[in-house]
Image (cartoon, coloured by chain):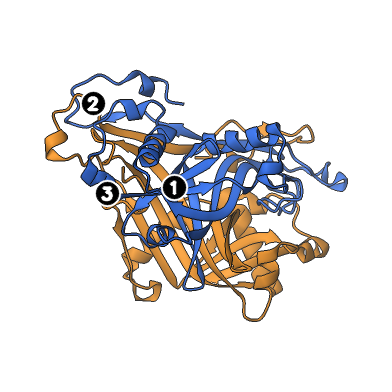
Chain colours: A blue, B orange
Amino acid sequence: MSDTAYDRTARTTPTRYRERATWEREAIHAILDSAWICHLGFVADGAPVVLPTIYARVGDRLYVHGSTGSRPLRAAGADEGLAVCVTVTLVDGLVLAKSAFNHSVNFRSVVAHGTAHQVTDPQELETALDALVDHSIPGRSGDVRRPTAKELAKTAVVRLVLDEVSAKTRDDGVHDDEADLGLPYWAGVVPVGTVHGTPVPDASTTVPLPAYLHDFR
Amino acid sequence: MSDTAYDRTARTTPTRYRERATWEREAIHAILDSAWICHLGFVADGAPVVLPTIYARVGDRLYVHGSTGSRPLRAAGADEGLAVCVTVTLVDGLVLAKSAFNHSVNFRSVVAHGTAHQVTDPQELETALDALVDHSIPGRSGDVRRPTAKELAKTAVVRLVLDEVSAKTRDDGVHDDEADLGLPYWAGVVPVGTVHGTPVPDASTTVPLPAYLHDFR
């Protein structure tokens, strides 16, 4: 089966970010803005490490959040920064073909390579933290108790400037071999998506559900 | 905010796989069996690379699928194998606290480190390919045209024996600071989950929807 990011039918856009046409940048931004969990890859003692974490995009910058005590965040605080690969994946469908081999997955993904640096400028840190809150819950950053200086000191955010970045998508039906078309198996697409359930208030909550959570996706 | 895999409230299980109690192995297997997309990390020319792909578990082995032409799969074909990190993440909820800092994410994740090797034994390859099909669509491998020798030659599967593997989960409510509990902001949990839509048959399909797709999650 070929149901992977390596799928022969998937489309890639291998040119570098700064050389891209506007529509390509917009396609990359649209994917990045449709998810809020990324997988952050880095090398520690020569071995690959991949950790899930939240992220946000502000213009051509990706911000990835972590704890000041975590290894990748400490490494990104050094002058030379930390070589990273940030990958964002949205799964849109299972593509069932009549042959096992031609099964596939509809998906959208972005892979960004570069050097991450810790955000130290207080203004940029505040912008990044607001974006990290609003990326998963649009409108939320204006409806919370904001971080104290002590909390900010405990929070590490790294910046990755979008430069070497590619998008890959598959959004298509079944591609069966001609010889397989008459076989008596079910072929088609099963849509896959992410949903939000009904918000469950904490016992401390005395206010009604805010508007930004009413029609949350 | 602390809504990441680095979350202070998240639980880790740092002992090595073979030293784990049965319930820990079962918890790791349960997470691995609840998802079918992983993020595969490896090092190429000294830099980290993270790619999304499908995987399956058979006992203590993870199988990751790719194309024979792809770089990681070629590297895993060498005798020394390829150092990888395979990470699987399920997002279960957004945890909204009254302070930005105490926002969090409910999630389940598994991180597996080790050396991946290409599967060359024909019997193991067949087992792995069936598992890859059935992992995302239980029961499907018995209802397709099976791979030909030519197709098998074009398909690469790598094996990672579960050895250095850890699980991390957060499944909890809001943890606000005592001093914030009276603030007039909405706090609570917004459940997040993956759903399957109504299957859309291909024009070539002449059979009814099979039973294994009827109540698909």
Q: CA distance from mark 1 to mark 2?
A: 25 Å
Residue type at mark 3 is Ala
Residue B3 in picture, x, y percent from top left = 34, 45
Q: CA distance from mark 3 to mark 1?
A: 16 Å
**Comparing labels 1 and 2, the label whose residue is closer to the camera:** 1
User: Which image quadrant is residue B159 in?
Assistant: bottom right
User: Which image quadrant is residue A132 in?
Assistant: top left
Residue A157 in picture, x, y percent from top left = 39, 48
Q: Which residue is mark 2?
A: B185
Q: Which residue is mark 1?
A: A64
Please indicate whether residue B94 sits to the left or right of residue B154 in the image. left
Q: Which residue is mark 3?
A: A153
| Name of the residue lying farthest toward the right | A179
Between B86 and A128, the one lying in front of the other is: A128
Same chain letter for marks 1 and 2: no
Q: CA distance from mark 2 to mark 3?
A: 24 Å
Residue type at mark 1 is Val
Q: What chain is tagged by disc 2?
A: B
Could you tell which of marks 3 and 1 lies nearer the N-terminus?
A: 1
Residue A164 in picture, x, y percent from top left = 63, 50
Whether residue B140 is situated above or below residue B189 in the rendered picture:
below
Residue type at mark 2 is Tyr
Identify the residue shown where x is 21% and y is 46%.
Answer: A150
Q: Label 3: how many residues lie within 10 Å, few (<14), some (14-19) or many (20+)?
A: few
